[in-house]
Image (cartoon, rainbow, N blue to C red):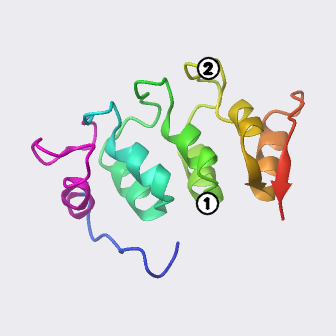
């Protein structure tokens, strides 16, 4: 995790921090399984940011690891699409499903064929977890 990223002491600090995002504006401070204005949860926000500390805090506080947003995407979909290897790896270690398909009928690893410059560690992770799948990828070194 980057040193510029906050070191949350507890889950409430993270939830208060994200409460002013457009996702949660004009709503009470979110709880771990809240859904915001666009159908996203605090865990999805943490995954998009690649914030492994927030992911750990949220899951420990009872966040649903496989919650889907309005596009059928999980936190794992978002961590991978945003190229956050550490966040994706942590979500997998904590039990995130690799089988949930989004509204484009793609699981988290299938969707990476849509993106250029994916971290080569994510490509290796995809290959390890889904060895029988052929992915058309352009990995970034």
Queried whether the magenta region covers residue 33, the answer comes back as yes
Frontmost residue, 40 versus 133: 40
Q: Start and end of the magenta stretch?
A: 12-34
> Residue 27, can we see it?
yes
Q: Which residue is denoted by mark 2 in the rendering?
A: 104
SS at mark 1 in the image: helix
The quarter in which the C terminus is drawn is bottom right
Rendering coords of residue 16 (x, y %): 18, 59
Distance between mark 1 and mark 2 Cα atoms: 25 Å
Frontmost residue, 95 versus 52: 52
Does 13 appear above or below 123? Answer: below
The label shown at residue 86 is: 1
| Residue at figure coordinates x 80%, y 48% from the top left | 123
Closer to the chain start, of discs 1 and 2, is 1
- Mark 2 is surrounded, within 10 Å at the Cα level, by few (under 14), some (14 to 19) or many (20 or more) other residues, namely few
Queried whether the magenta region covers residue 77, the answer comes back as no
- The outermost residue toward the bottom is 3
SS at mark 2 in the image: loop
Whether residue 61 sits left or right of residue 30 in the image: it is right
Whether residue 102 sits left or right of residue 32 in the image: it is right
Q: Quadrant of residue 108?
A: top right
- Magenta span: chief secondary structure: loop
The nearer-to-camera label among 1 and 2 is 2
> Residue 93, can we see it?
no
| Residue at figure coordinates x 26%, y 36% from the top left | 36
Does 68 appear above or below 79? Answer: above
| Residue at figure coordinates x 41%, y 28% from the top left | 69
Frontmost residue, 30 versus 81: 81
- Mark 1 is surrounded, within 10 Å at the Cα level, by few (under 14), some (14 to 19) or many (20 or more) other residues, namely some
Rendering coords of residue 39 (x, y %): 33, 30
Rendering coords of residue 12 (x, y %): 20, 58
């Amino acid at each position: 995790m980057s040193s510029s990223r906050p070191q949350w002491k507890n889950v409430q600090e993270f939830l208060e921090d994200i409460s002013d995002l457009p996702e949660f504006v004009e709503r009470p401070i979110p709880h771990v399984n809240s859904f915001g204005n666009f159908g996203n949860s605090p865990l999805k926000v943490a995954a998009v940011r690649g914030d492994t500390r927030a992911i750990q805090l949220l899951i420990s506080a009872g966040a649903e690891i496989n919650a889907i947003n309005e596009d059928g995407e999980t936190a794992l979909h978002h961590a991978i699409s945003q190229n956050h290897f550490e966040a994706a790896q942590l979500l997998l270690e904590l039990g995130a499903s690799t089988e949930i398909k989004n509204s484009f009928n793609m699981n988290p690893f299938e969707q990476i064929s849509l993106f250029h410059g994916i971290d080569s560690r994510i490509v290796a992770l995809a290959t390890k977890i889904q060895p029988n799948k052929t992915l058309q990828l352009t990995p970034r070194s």
